[in-house]
Amino acid sequence: MQNEQPVRIYYLSAGSLGVPILAALKESDRIDLTGIGSQPDRPAGRRQIDTPTPLTSAAEEQGLHVDRLNDVNTEEFHQKLRDLSVELLVVASFGQLLKPALLELPPFGCLNIHASILPKYRGASPIQAAILNGDDESGVTFMNMEAGLDTGGVYRTVTCPIGQETGSELEQKLGELAAAHVVDTIWDVARNHLQWRPQDDATSSYARKIKKEHGAMRWAQPAIVLERMVRAYSPWPRVTALLPIGGKMRQIQLTHAVAESWNGAVCQPGTLLESDKKGLLVACSEGALRITDLIPEGKTEVSVAALLNGYRFAIGTVLPDYVPPPKDNKKKK
């Protein structure tokens, strides 16, 4: 006789992807959510204030307790799962490596929810990679976790088209897609004996961890590449460029920009071609990038149309590339 009892799970998540999934788990009568774990609060923002993860914030707003876990690979956490009689560990955008002892602990193992169509874009930044590469489609893979990085067997994959979403917008879209299928997948794994299929390692690709310097503006790139960067790196690390504001080159962060063709004279990449209420049009190695919205250094987001009420930018000005300041690797005493 099939077991019709709710599946006892423990949920590990940190990023925004996991927020819609949490709602689906919490609301289902086929799921017994025994606990929620996330990363500890970390310093964030210019004032470096300790800030909970997006998952922790969302859960606590709903009155749910969240375990802040420095390391899930401790005997203390393992014993907690045993005491809770957890059948399946569910993981989404968590950010810690789960070692074999933990992966093998629940009777039905660990179900990872990965924001790509595996084996494409294994690794830390699959959402950004899909935008940067101009993909027409993305998706969510429900997989059996193993010791390798996103190499486990696939239970189910669901897909969706990519439009002009930013990184944060696509993350929300994929989180909602995962939420629509997570309960059925958990039930099929734990109650209907759903079997996973192996990935084809020969077709795999890897999405590297994003660093702040990846958003540094280099004008000698095709405009379409820069447009995708602006979308992919929103809200972090954003694309940082330089613009002469008030007689001084200042940092700006691009929040919206569009690649356009340019049929005028061939110009050095970085040359300002147009400056009007439609935006700042800047020459690239191929085409031109029209910047319509930005964040000036130390300010809030503003449209170029509004910025032009107080500043003027000379056509023909060559905007320099942005070079990130060198890292201070000296140990603080």
Image (cartoon, grey):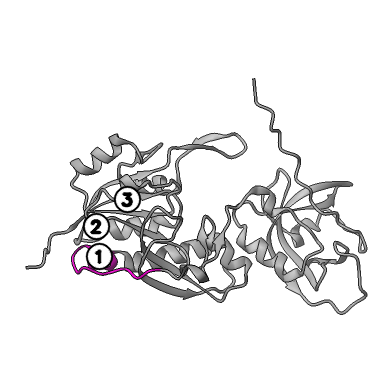
The quadrant holding residue 238 is bottom right
* Camera-nearest label, 1 or 3: 3
Q: Position of residue 49 (x, y in %)?
A: 53, 34
- Residue 154 visible somewhere in the drawing: yes
Neighbourhood count class around disc 1 (C-alpha, 10 Å): few under 14, some 14–19, many 20 upward: many
Q: Earlier in the sequence, mark 3 or mark 2?
A: 3
User: Label 1 sits on what residue type?
Assistant: Val
In the picture shown, does residue 280 fall above or below 61?
A: below
Residue 195 shown in magenta: yes
Read off the magenta span. 183-198
Image coordinates for residue 248, horizontal then vertical, percent: 87, 45
On screen, residue 185 above or below 43: below
**Label annotation for residue 264:** none
Q: Secondary structure at mark 1?
A: helix
Dividing the picture into quarters, in which one does residue 279 lie? bottom right
Amino acid at circle 3: Leu
Residue at position x 31%, y 45% in the image: 101
* Quadrant of the image containing the C terminus: top right
Q: CA distance from mark 3 to mark 2?
A: 9 Å
Q: Please provide percent x and percent y for residue 208.
A: 58, 56
Task: Give the Cα distance between marks 2 and 1.
Answer: 7 Å
Q: Residues within 10 Å of mark 2 (few under 14, many from 20)?
A: some
Residue receiving disc 1: 189
Q: Does dot 2 land on a helix, a strand or a loop?
A: loop
**C-alpha gap between disc 1 and disc 3:** 15 Å
Residues at discs 3 and 2 in contact (Cβ within 8 Å) = no
Q: Which residue is mark 3?
A: 103
Tell me, yes or no, whether the two marked residues, 2 and 1, touch with CB atoms within 8 Å.
yes
Disc 2 target residue: 108
Which sits in the foreground, 267 or 9? 9
